[in-house]
Amino acid sequence: MRARRGVLIVLALLALLILVAAWPEFYTEWLWFESVGYLSVFRTRLTAQFGLFLIAGLVTFALIGLNLVLARRLTSSPFAVYLRSGRSRQVIELADRATTFAIWLAAGVLGLVFGLVAAARWNLFLRFANAVPFGVSDPVFGQDVGFYVFALPVGRTLINGLLWALGLALIGAALVYGGGQLRAELRVYSPRALMHLSVLGALWLLVKSADYLVQRYELLYTARAAAAGPGFTDITVRLPALTILAVVVGAAAVLLLAAGWSRRAGFAWTGLGLWLATLVLANLVPPLVQQFQARPNELVLERPYIERAIAGTRAAYNLDAIQEFQYSGQGTLSATALEEHQATLSNVRVWDYRPLLATYAQLQEIRPYYDFYDVDVAAYTLGGELRGLMLSAREMNVEQLNEEARTWVNQHLVYTHGYGYVANPVNQIGAEGLPVFLVKDIPPQSSVPELAVTRPEIYYGEETTNYVIVNTQTEEFDYPMGEENVYTRFQGISGVPLSSFWRRLAFFIRFGSSPILLSPSITSESRILFHRQITDRVQTVAPFLRYDPDPYLAVADGKLYWIYDGYTFTARYPYSESYDENTNYIRNAVKITLDAYDGTMRFYIADPTDPLIRTWARVFPDLFRPLEEMPRSLAERIRYPEGLFRIQAYMFGTFHMRDPQVFYNKEDLWTLAYELHGSQRQQIEPYYVVMRLPDRNTPEFLLIVPYTPMNRDNMIAWLYAHSGGPNYGQLGVYKFSKQELAYGPMQIESRINQDPTISAQLTLWDQRGSQVIGGNLLVIPIDNALIYVKPIFLQAETSRLPELQRVIVAYRDHIVMETSLRAGLERIFGIATGPPPTPEPGPTPTASDVAALARSAQAHYDRAQACLRAGDWACYGEEQAALQRDLEALVAATEQ
């Protein structure tokens, strides 16, 4: 009795220490969830974790503790530990009270471990309790796919836990009956001890039998055959073998009970022998069948299983939704055809996000503590026209403050937020190869009303990782204004109020920062903002989702928002090829919007047909909303996620082959096309474009990527996804003829390097203090033809300001390098081509003539730029031609 009381006291003290250590984290998280409006999500998760911890901990504690105490009471000799040192041996006998105390303490510690492991699997049990069926049955057992996704993981967890718990109880009881000797003579166990051990052993074997039954179902997402899922050998040999193993192990459990009851060890050895013999055969026969029966006739025997793998994988990655079209790529383009596709050509992205980010940093960071973290590509309707834009948020990075200014007050009370953003069209080039900003400077100045913002402060962003405290007696820095600074106070309602001593104490302990507790600037009206980094913020609320690696900035209703794509996924979809160890099924089921100013999050269900998100919506009914409830201004900003598109494009490269024989022979394997970045060969990243599809009349915002055949560089297809508008989410692929050559990006890269004029110019630039940076090579499909575009940036070694100096344009056998895309197209398609005419000798020009020509050239250049911004290609071409005439006349005049 005293031993149990002592154990309870020790365990209570241990629990108290854990609670004291966890209290600040738990309490501050509770307050945070309450502040963001998702306290019910936290409570549901916490209830599940605590319930699982309690159940698993108590069951383990009772199972191990009661069996060890029973073993101690069923043995008459004192518990002894034998210690051997050389030839001498020392025997230490432990008192019953000490033995019992040690037993219960060990059981308590193991219960704590098992409880923590179970609590970490809260998501499995909540999904199982709220499961929504997939409505699709597997072709082997006829079970709904939901059985494999929801029920089987719980079964596997329970079986593994019971195997460990019963195994530890069996080993512990055997040690107790053996008196603790590990290297002493064999002891003769009493009949009651043998019966006890045989019961524990039989229970372990029965659970192992259930384990073999579960392994039968787990065969459906193995990867040993010619394709995903079980093949001929798995179904005809391994599946029956696992069934036989389950029966044999069940029989071994009965024989072990008989051995304990009759005290005849032969029963136990018979059961063990049967199990081992069956296990050896189960591991030897399948490889032999595979080698000598399946492999010699593999295509015939595996054909039905390959068909299952193709169907399962296409369903799991939504590849069945991809519409297929033929595209010759050999069409003939004319100047008239180009004019008809102005919407596409005026939105070709010549700005690569990598050098553009460096350009933003040099031109628009304004102060060293501001930072542009990433550049996003978007499409906005400006003046009634769909335009491709590059956008980037100007965030605060307190790590870049001067060392003297990097005080606690500055980092957490003063420099609390970033300010504004920048935007430029994807296709326009300004003076000296710099972007033409539509939004720039601080405060943000917008040249178009659709991009104007009235709330430019950014308290939540991609790199705002530090906590800040707002509404203090210290003014917050808002933005610089000449030699002075403008200050502000946070007007939002987000953050946790520091309204009591206990709250300040909890945050002081959590962040290890004494000023939170002691600073006189902090009042009861102050609020602490943390979890400000947007990835951390959404993952804290919904850790069961996978998130796209590229959240993007959106401008709506005069405010800045972040839009994030969340994925539901599993690795347990039957007969589906794995993309990675955690994924053989994925859906873009959630769109998340996050207010950059006050951090407000909204989770919208983007794919209501997905059973996984419908299950999570049952688990957390207060978390998810229908996509129809998203404000229209934000709904217009969503785009198809690049992360999901990459996965689908990768899988489609193999699983566009639906004929089992073609698939088996890998006759038509595709891979994402390659390009050169610097001197490194790398796969092309999918890219967003505004263009008109061959069978459509209006331009749309698309995400596309080209394919090449495996180990070849010619282009075989290009995949697209609608990224906005009424057709959002539709997928399609245009396939090229296998009898005609369509140049792939690497072939164009080779032609660029082999062109003597272009190669010589690039080599000349790439020396003497400058560096040539090649941008993304874009493939633009137009009217059954292909145009290739590659921007060239030039950066001085003494500067981090890349300038867009040239654009390389390729079409069929033509390849040119000009100052703009339009100039390249004009040269290729016969508009203003050829050398300038030799001027006839004339009278010597006067200074006034030269000045007039210069003013005329400047006027034509200004008008050409205005036409370019308006997207009026006809006007632009006329002004460029007039500019060329003036320049030719000016050159002729100055040479006389």
Image (cartoon, rainbow, N blue to C red):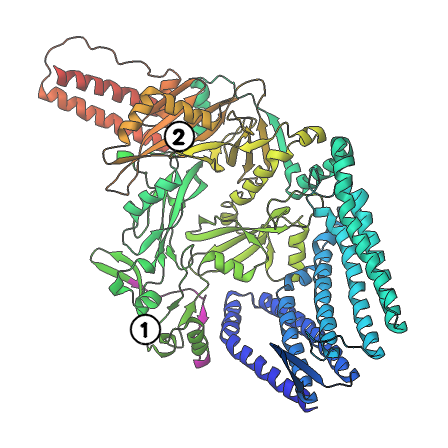
Residue bearing the label numbered 2: 790
Say what amino acid the circle numbered 2 marks: Lys
Which numbered disc, 2 or 1, marks the residue closer to the eye? 2
Q: Quadrant of residue 459?
A: bottom left
Query: Which secondary structure, mark 1?
Result: loop
Q: Residue furthest right?
A: 262
User: What's the magenta region?
Assistant: 487-502
Residue bearing the label numbered 1: 473
Residue 81 visible in the current orientation:
yes
Query: Which secondary structure, mark 2?
Result: strand
Q: Earlier in the sequence, mark 2 or mark 1?
A: 1
Image coords of residue 173 (percent x, y): 74, 76
Residue 666 has which mark?
none
Q: Is residue 698 above or below residue 457?
A: above
The residue closer to the viewer here, 602 or 538, is 538
Say what amino acid the circle numbered 1 marks: Gln
As for residue 227 lying within the magenta part, the answer is: no
483 sits left or right of 241 in the view: left
Q: Residue furthest bottom?
A: 2
How far apart marks 2 and 1 lie (CA) works out to 53 Å
